[in-house]
Image (cartoon, rainbow, N blue to C red):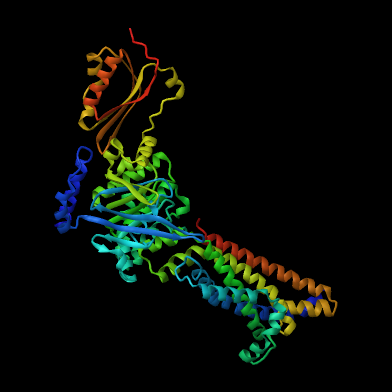
Amino acid sequence: MSKQILSLLPDLGKAFWETFQMVGISLSLALFLGVPLGLLLFITDKGLFWENKIFNTIGGVLVNIIRSIPFVILLVILLPLTQKLVKTTIGPLAASVSLSVAAVVFYARIAEASLREVDKGVIEAATAMGASIPQIITQVLLVEALPGLIRGFTVTAISLIGYSAMAGIVGGGGVGDLAIRYGYYRYQMDVMAATVVVLIILVQIIQTLGDYSAKTADKA
Amino acid sequence: MPYLNGLKTNTVNRENTGCREINPPLLLPAALFLRENMIKFENISITFNTKSDAVRAVKNVSFEVNKGEIFGIVGTSGAGKSTLLRTVNLLERPASGKVSVDGVDITSLDKKSLRRARQKIGMIFQHYNLVHTKTVYDNIAFPMRISGKNGKEISKKVPELLEIVGLSDKARVYPGQLSGGQKQRVGIARALANDPHLLLCDEPTSALDLETTRSILELIRDINKRYGITVLLISHEMDVIKSICSRVAVMSGGEVVELNDVYSIFSNPRHEITKQLVRNSLNLEIPDGILGNMKGSLVKVLYRGPSALNPVISNAIRKYPVDINILHGRIEYINNQPIGILLVNLRGENSEVTKLIKYLKDNTASTEVVYEQTDIKPAS
């Protein structure tokens, strides 16, 4: 048994690298596009400084639509876009396209919720000090929401590992794909067990790191 | 120089409180030249639109706050005082009317000038509103960074501010580790960071216990004295007003119902709301049981100003054959002037009691019979 797993090591390594690529790309995009999107959804809401009902409603509905599509279906729907963007629909890079779309809207909602948690009084105090809107965003809102943003980032990262397994269906590769191919199609339960164990450890590490960073950022 | 003159006028004003009101027409021409008011509210109205209708939170309010004074706005919750305060730095834009701060109409400023103006108006809040994820040091440095001060200025100023509020050892601590009173001190230091000429206090002690309230109010008064910063403070507690304000506006239902120096408000409240607030603060209640067993009449005697020091009661006892029993009494010092209130029970011949009451009326600020037991037996 152990021999079998040992022979699988190169495959396992490759699968991990693919998972890492998919999660890494989509997570980075979630951070760089999701936070601004969440921020926009937040500050265009009623009573805030860029109050804009039309933008807020359209943005909110759009995010909800994408979020309500099951990921497997989103993968398929986005195939034409993937083809256009990366010239192929197979491989981790192709899978990253739909993963990223899902990740961005997912994290945008989480970021919006974290920003909503920021004490309105603190925003008011900054306004009273004569802070400009960009100053309030960068020096109050994002700073105060940081613990929530980190916790949300952890949740997003772990969800993406799960999603990336589904990406294997369209030939994205990765650890999930490995588990399905060996464990499900070839009945090699030990291989599947091994990948699951590895995934559990990976998720634990991410969760621990995330909790620790959130705790460090949270001074309340 | 005009600024100094403004301050001087104020000092006179403060010392005079109570005995006599300064004649406004006399000061008016000087005020025009010296711009001695720090805040000027002109016909301020604020309307909140709710789903069903529009609520008028502030109705046509006009008054002025002098340079260098501590001015209070008092009223029950929902009276519109907080809303009015927030028009001074335009956190709330009035539906109509004009607010001038140090001669500048704040409602007419463009965004950039408004931010500049706000930097010179410090504000402290009931719930402190500190940035939780910044240290005490960074919280205080924050307004300076906003206004573009350089690092050198900041590292010089912040320790000074910490010193003023007595928190020099807490620079590296986060607000979450501080007590309420300490948080408010950080709030005050933060409000002073950009050398404001005006400090707005929105219920600054309402979340604090008595002892801490006293120390925070002392700090505010100290800052007002040392730096000549005008203070506009709102509170629902008459006690807060009594301990630091020189003048006060009483608000009810969005209107200013009475405005006077604090001593006059306490010694001679005119409006029903003011009377109620003063009564709550002075707390002169006699239990019903005692009132029921009492014989004769119950008289409330009020002393104020220098007359409070005359031995009126002692003279009255000597002059008239009437028994005087003191049931309740209190002397308050407001801006260093005494107000005395006594509830006394008088028993004796009707005619003598009447004469005594007249004597008291002539020699005290006010004397009123508040209760009379019909079955009066002459004391023998």
Q: In which quadrant is the C terminus of chain B drawn?
A: top left
Drawn side of residue B5 relative to residue B234, left or right:
left
The image shows residue A50, relative to residue B87, as above or below, that is: below
Q: Position of residue B28 (x, y in %)?
A: 16, 53
The residue located at (44%, 25%) in the rendering is B287
Q: In which quadrant is the N terminus of chain B drawn?
A: bottom left
In the current view of this chain or complex, which residue is farthest to the right? A187
The residue located at (32%, 67%) in the rendering is B114
Q: Hey, which quadrant is residue A172 in on the image?
A: bottom right
Residue B80 makes an appearance in the image: yes
* Residue closest to the eye, B215 or B152: B215
The residue located at (44%, 62%) in the rendering is A123
Q: Position of residue B67 (x, y in %)?
A: 23, 53
Q: Position of residue A108 (x, y in %)?
A: 57, 72
* Residue closest to the eye, A113 or A207: A113
* Residue closest to the eye, B232 or B287: B287
Drawn side of residue A60 relative to residue B47, left or right:
right
Residue B131 makes an appearance in the image: no
Q: Hey, which quadrant is residue A22 in on the image?
A: bottom right
The image shows residue A157, relative to residue B170, as above or below, that is: below
